[in-house]
Structure formats: C-alpha cells, structure tokens
Amino acid sequence: MFRIDLDQWEEILTTITRNKTRSFLTAFGIFWGIFTLVALMGGSQGILEMMASNFEGFATNSGFTGTSQTSKAYKGFRKGRNWTLVLEDVERIRKAIPEIDLLTPCNAQWRIKATYDKHQSSSCSMKGVHPEYAQIESPVLTFGRFINYIDVKEHRKVCVIGKQIYETLFPDGSDPCGKFINVNGIYYQVIGVNTSSGNMSVNGWPPTTITIPFSTMQQNYNFGKNIQLLCYTAHPNFSVKDIQTRIEPILKNAHLIHPEDKQAVVNVNAEVLFSMVDNLFKGIKILSWMVGLGTLLAGAIGVSNIMMVTVKERTTEIGIRRAIGAKPRDILNQILSESMVLTTIAGMIGISFAVFVLQMLELGTAHLETPAHFQISFWMAIGACIILMILGILAGLTPAYRAMAIKPIEAIRDE
C-alpha cells in the first residue's frame, strides 16, 4: 500500500532549508541549466521555422542554366563573345536527357512600372513563364488563378501580380481579377494575386513580380526565340548536378563554345543550396542540445558537490542513525531523495520560466508575415522532466554511497 512518510519529507525540507543561501545557489545552477536547454530548443525551432519559410514552395530538386560571356576563343569566335539560349535548346535537352522531369524556359524584364487608377508601383519585375513553372516555384494564390496553357497559346495579355504590387495598386483590398493594369504602356488583365513572400525565387522577388504568359513576353518585348534561363527538375533518384554536367556539352556544341570554357554556361543548383541549409539546420539543433545539456550537467555537478559537503557535515548524524538500526538502503534513499527534490523543484521552475519566455517571444512575432512557433512540444517538456530526474539521481549517487560507507564508530570518533 502506498504511504507517504511525512517524517522523511520533513527531514528533507529541514536539510534543504538549513543553509538557505547554499541551497539557493545550488538550485539556481539546475534552474539556469534547464532554462537554457528548453529556451535553446524552442528558440532554435522558431528560428529554423522562420528560415525555412523563405524556401517554402520552392522545388528542392531544381536547377537553372543561363549564359555568360565566353572565356575562350573557339572556331573563329573571339574570346568574350555574348551568346543566348534559344527555344531549340529546350527540345535538344529534353530529348537528350530523359532524367529531367520538368524543363521550361523563363524570361524576365526589370525596372517595370505598374499603374492602376491613381496608384503606382515602381521598381517591379516581370516574368514570362509556362504553366508548369508553378511546379518549380509554387504560387500562393489569394485571388484568381495562375497562367494556363490557353493563355500561352493565345498570347493573352493577362498577369498574376505579387502581394506588394496588389497592396499598392488596390489598397482597398478588393478583388483585382478582371481589372486592367498599365505595365510600361501595355494593359494586362489581372487574373490572380500571388501572396508568396519566400526569398528563394528566380528572376524577381515574388511580392514585386508580375507574371505573364511566356508567349506574351516573347511577343511584347521582342525576345523572339531567345531565352534567358532554362529551369528544370530532376526525376527522383537522379541528382541535379549530374543533369547539369550533361546539359553543358549539349549547349556548348550547339552554340560553338569551347568544351573547356568554364565561364560561358552558368548553372545554379538549388538541390545543393537546400542541402547546405538542411545541414545548417541540423548543426543549429546539435549545437543547441550541446550548450543546453552542458549547462544542465554543470548544474548537476554543483548539486553533487553540495550534497558531498552536506554528507560530510552530517557524518555524526548518519553514524548515530546507523548505530540505532538504520539500514544502508535507508541512508541511500534519504540522500537520493534530497538530491532529487532539490533538482526537481529547481528544474520545474526553470522549465516553467522558459515556457513563459518562449510564449512571450511567440506572441511578439505573431504579427510577422511568417510567424514562427517558438513553444516546445509536450513530449519535449516530458523529455526535459525525465532528464531532470535522471540527473537528480546521478547527482546524489556519489554522496549517497559515501554516506552509506560511514561506520558508526568512526563517526562518533570524528565527533
């Protein structure tokens, strides 16, 4: 039958409060250690969420290829020649590299000015894409729809505007779909609003980008067959790096570029960038655990040292208890109980304070476009409590065994 030994708890309380300053400083080590651990766990989680939101909706297995001046003379062409990709390159690459899942061209214009009624949005960018481009950079549509195949086929003058452009041109928050905006002298009908705010983007930041059909871009801005950028994704189990290695010789051969020219073809591998970010996230988590556990372990060592001092001071008391019949197990339980109570009380206060600080931090960032969750999960809190109990036991083991080794005769002799 479960029974609470009030005398034992009274003795534990008396022992802890006997030297209040020492007990407070010892408890503060545990409090600060568990507070640091929980705060770092919640804080790192929130920061990682905020960082991850910048890449939300962007294909992790994507790559991009553009052009630059040649660095080597080749077949009568001088060094420093400018060259451009053409529509035929899309078919060349698609036929030669079946490992490519999606391949689409993209063109852009900069320093675009858009107006509607009396409102004007300056320093915008314009991007011409095919519908499948949404699989690389997924739009977040609040109103309307994205570019479709009919828009491209019929060279429609329609557009999807970014969030910042929408807020500037339509400050009343009304639905802009069906309305016409003036973009550098050409009127486009708004068919959608992309509220994506990710910093990972191609040919323009989404909030300040106007997206139109690729064919309309080619026609209205005299691109002809020229392409600024090739965008593609790799099939599962194939790497973007391998695909880019195969794309380069195809383009160099078609455009008479020296095979060893390292400058002419510009490749961007989003797969590598995302891998670097993932490794950074893992590093932050590992560092947070190391710092938090290290601080907590230092606090536990402090508890163990203080318990050793307490046992030394209570040598006579323990000896007398042994002389009147106390078993070694009773001494062990007493010392471990004192260590666990001191550790648990300080730890629970530390966890509670850390949760309070994280909640205030979460409320403080709630107004941001991409609010993060800094609060720890229920199971993380349970894990912190389990760590506390384990450390409480470990901190009291050495002092408890030392107390068990005290013999009544030696204790009375010391007195």
Image (spheres, rainbow, N blue to C red):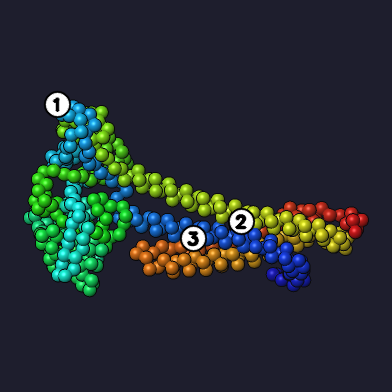
On the picture, is 206 further left or further right than 38? left
Q: Secondary structure at mark 3?
A: helix
Q: Which residue is mark 2?
A: 296
Q: Depth check: 39 or 166 in front? A: 166
- Residue 5, horizontal then vertical, whole percent: 74, 70
* Cα distance between the residues tagged 3 and 2: 16 Å
* Cα distance between the residues tagged 2 and 1: 70 Å
On the picture, is 414 further left or further right than 168? right
Tag shown at residue 76: 1
Q: Depth check: 305 or 222 in front? A: 222
Identified by mark 2, the residue type is Leu
Q: Which residue is mark 3?
A: 42
Label 3 packing within 10 angstroms: few (<14), some (14-19), many (20+): many
**Considering only order in the chain, which callout, 1 or 2, is on the residue closer to the N terminus?**
1
Q: Are marks 2 and 1 in contact (CB under 8 Å)?
A: no
Q: Depth check: 104 or 66 in front? A: 66
On the picture, is 220 further left or further right than 56? left
Q: Depth check: 377 or 366 in front? A: 366
Which callout, 1 or 3, points to the residue nearer the camera? Answer: 1
For image coordinates 54% across by 62% down, the residue present is 381
**Considering only order in the chain, which callout, 2 or 3, is on the residue closer to the N terminus?**
3
Identified by mark 3, the residue type is Gly
On the question of residue 133 being in view, the answer is yes
